[in-house]
Amino acid sequence: MVTKFCIKNLNIWFDSMQALKQINMNILPNEILSVIGPSNSGKTTFLRMLNRLNDLNPCFKMAGEVIFEGKDITKIDVGVVRRKIGMVFALPLLLPLSIFENVAYGVRMHGLVGKNKISEKVEEALRRGYLWDEVKDRLNESAFKLSGGQQQRLCIARTLAVQPEVILFDEPCSGLDPISTAKVEDAMVKLKEKYTIVLVTNNVKQAARVGDRTAFFLNGELIELDKTETIFTAPKDKRTDGYIRGKFG
């Protein structure tokens, strides 16, 4: 089986607190993997491990392996890792710049020069983020004038502009209204044609709507991983069933 990530016996600690315990799983190319579970179940720690953001915490320790495209991710230059594996956070993290410059900034940081080439990359990224038609006539306006949902799609476009292979989403719709949420979800479903997507969400209905497979985490353990339809209709573990039914979490 071709895999994008292969995680083997992964354990993570922050000082003496163990956040993840013996995680073994694969993430497949061009799938949306939904990751669900209650607060403090290890979901975000798992997500941040995939592009080494946990490294920024001085208390972080790990054991086990995270293999990305056949290579130990800890042995790949961290700059390369974060270019190939982009991340969209719960709250849109915009730069105090125009809509255009929010996308162009990352393109320039990765060495592309020339006004026309940069403009082409910005337009391409905004189209892939399903935002171009809404902003093409106002590219020089402040990004902060966009609605919350548009700001989140701008962050997606900015991530796409540096041509990653994987996009990590950490609760990307937590502050959005239903209409904006639907647009972000539509974008994710279309993006999986070219990208591998890992979505951490507390919204089990969202996980069911967009995920090809779903992983259920509880107390730092991977309880169950299966096709999304199976997880939501015939889970093998009673704890998965209880969480999905809202009995805890």
Image (cartoon, rainbow, N blue to C red):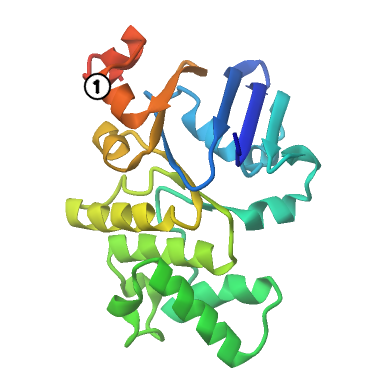
User: Measured along the vertical axis of the image, is residue 212 above or below residue 185?
Assistant: above
Q: Which amino acid is tagged 1?
A: Thr
Is disc 1 placed on a helix, strand or loop? helix
State which quarter of the image contains the C terminus: top left
**Res. 154 image quadrant:** bottom left
Residue placed most toward the observer, 239 or 234: 234
Q: Is residue 4 left or right of residue 55?
A: left
Q: Give the class, few, some or many, for how many residues have Cα within 10 Å of label 1's Cα (few <14, many ≥20).
A: few
Check disc 1 and report the residue beneath it: 233
- In which quadrant of the rendered image does the N terminus lie? top right
Residue 38 picture quarter: top left
Q: Is residue 231 above or below residue 57?
A: above
Residue 244 screen position, x and y as percent: 26, 21
Identity of the residue drawn at 60% across and 38% down: 3
Question: Would residue 127 be seen by someone viewing this image from the given angle?
Answer: yes
Residue, x 45% and y 66% (percent of image)? 157
Residue closer to the observer: 95 or 12: 12
